[in-house]
Amino acid sequence: MRSYNRKPKKPFVLRKPDGTIAAGTLTFAFRNPKPGDWIEVINEDTDFRNPTSYTNTVRVTYPNAVSAQAFGEYTKKFLKNLGYPASDTLMSLSVCSDDINAPMFVDEANLGQHPLSLNEYLGPFISGGLAGYPHTGVTGLGAYASHVTDTGNLFVMNMPHIGISSNGTVGSIIRKGQTTQNTSCGAVLAAIGWVGANAGLPVQANFADDYQQFFITDILASVTNRALIAAATGNPAKMVVATEILRAAGQTFLLGATGIRSAAGTNAINGSTRDTFFMSGTFINVDHGYEAYIDVVSFQKLPKGTTTWVDLTTTFKAGLPK
């Protein structure tokens, strides 16, 4: 018979009606104590196993990157303390469809690096495609919003991905079962290659049966973005620039009038009465056997019944484990 280790108890404190913490109420339990307004204490016990050297290597390119596992644990506690438990929150995950971004599992040595700490969320609804752009578009967002539970809320995550190997190579990692480095994200590198070899904008007819690649190439091929990429020296630097361009493009759509606001705001179907949270950043892949990182750029809230986003980025990032 298989046996499992029991999960450790979590720290809780009692919140008074005025919002302050009642002195001397710290207690440890498997779940929220009752009765009373108990909140879970946010701490930095993240069970993170990467060596400091790898973290330092990643932070050469992304100085504010944190463990993906730590990000997940922190995010759950951050939202839960605002009254939004992960167990009643439907996630939309817009990350590249690369298998390296698939969920991790406790008892399986799978390829994926999407952290265990985010598996408690409902879903996720897979809204991303090549380069992590939310390719399911307006229809996908509408479907996603309509799947929320009767008492739940929404959490949209938007992240292109980029690999950084333990030896510091940006844009490549060593995948499971391979001994040489492999590109991450290959679609972004291909788009950069097209922009470097061709003038003007791509023609969709020349990308037969390859619409998503056409779409991200079209974004990178604009006059402004082409100049930004050209100014970067070498493919690693170009991939960092292009990844950020695609992240920003995804955020612009998702926060715009036809994005989440339309699906979960005042014009929505079932999502019209739901609070919605949005996070945008970069998912950083690593060599097999290590744990991924996340660089958070934006964290916002769309209160139910409104069309105005509330920026929580500074507050959210201030508590992220370092």
Image: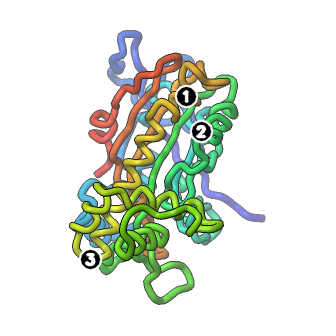
- Three-letter residue code for mark 3: Gly
Considering the image in quadrants, where does the N terminus appear? Answer: bottom right
Task: Tell me the residue that label 2 is attached to.
Answer: 138
Q: Secondary structure at mark 3?
A: loop
Identify the residue at image location x=35%, y=48%: 296
Q: Secondary structure at mark 1?
A: helix
- Three-letter residue code for mark 1: Ser
Task: Tell me the residue that label 1 is attached to.
Answer: 262
Query: Would you place residue 151 above or below residue 133 in this image?
Result: above
Task: Tell me the residue that label 3 is attached to.
Answer: 234
Identify the residue at image location x=64%, y=38%: 144
Query: Would you place residue 184 above or below residue 63 in this image?
Result: below
Distance in Å between CA atoms under marks 3 and 2: 36 Å
Do the residues under discs 1 and 2 have CB atoms within 8 angstroms?
Answer: yes
Seen from the viewer's position, the closer of residues 242 and 313 is: 242
Q: Position of residue 26 (x, y in %)?
A: 40, 30
Residue extending furthest toward the bottom: 179
Left or right: 23, with 83 as reference point: left
